[in-house]
Image: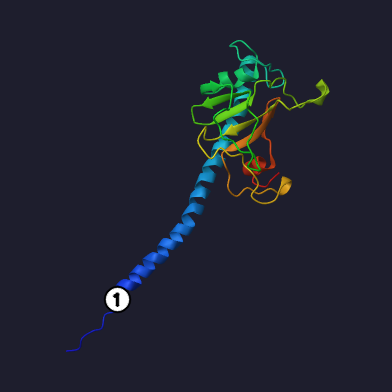
Amino acid sequence: MRLSNKSAFTLAEVLITLGIIGVVAAMTMPTLMNSTQGAQYKAAYKKGLSALSQAVTLNVALDDYNFAQATTGDAAGDASMYNIFKNRMNVVKTSKTTTGYDIKDETGNDFTQGTSNYVLFFNDGIVFSFPTTAANCTNDETVGTVNLTNCKGFIDVNGEKNPNRIVKCDTGSKDKCVVKNPTDIYPVVFYDQTVLPNSWAARNVLYGDGK
């Protein structure tokens, strides 16, 4: 009777294969996780911008004023910037300081904007912060000198959770900016009935082409 020869993997071969799989997984998992998290940040950022834009549109319809006519103040009856967002969005908590945030700018330094900012916490976890001095935010040059200095803020798409870093260009700069790893904080500028990204990196995340 003829015996058939059967081939099989040895224990050493199996262990070597498992080791290779483990090394490959260890190398690719961080990139995969960063990509997934970056996609979540990007989606939340777009959602936040859309919600802010809808708030001013709704306020024009109901109270007949936009960013250009808005005043300072946070009293219930004020026709203010604060009340545009407070009355037209699902705000669960407010503050007048970003103390407690460990926010870094595009170069990794402390982000000083916000020491006298309103901070609005929304029910979906997104935070919007802007200066308490923001008022009459317009880009209409026919009304006189346009100064949007106080009409700038930031969206933090995951609230006080880390990394609390402003989005920055991974490669290039200005109109050549490319963001490969979106983070959670995005500068914005608001005027009239418009809310827009306020950095090349923030624009790249929104539009995908750095413009």
Q: Position of residue 28 (x, y in %)?
A: 48, 57
Identify the residue position indicated by label 1 in the image: 8
Q: Residue furthest top?
A: 77
Q: Quadrant of residue 19?
A: bottom left
Identity of the residue furthest to the left in this view: 1
- Residue at coordinates 29% horizontally, 79% vertically from top-left? 7
For label 1, the SS is: loop
Q: How is the image coloured?
A: rainbow
Spot occupied by residue 210 in the image (x, y as percentages of width and height)? 69, 46
For disc 1, the neighbor class at 10 Å (few under 14, some 14 to 19, many from 20) is few
The residue located at (34%, 68%) in the rendering is: 15
The quarter holding residue 16 reads: bottom left
Vertical side of 139 occupied by 200: above or below: below
Viewer-side residue, 62 vs 118? 118
Q: Is residue 50 left or right of residue 24?
A: right
Q: Amino acid at mark 1?
A: Ala
- Count the marks: how many? 1
Query: In which quadrant of the rendered view does residue 105 lie?
Result: top right
Q: Is residue 187 above or below residue 178?
A: above
Position of residue 102 in the picture relative to residue 198 (left or right): left
Q: Quadrant of the C terminus?
A: top right
Quadrant where the N terminus sits is bottom left
Q: Residue at x 71, y 49 (%)?
A: 176
**x and y percent of residue 102 in the render?**
56, 35
Instruction: Say which residue appears at 56% left-offset and 32% top-offset.
Output: 101
Question: In the image, residue 68 lies at what x, y percent?
Answer: 72, 21
Relative vertical location of residue 5 with respect to residue 120 in this rendering, above or below: below
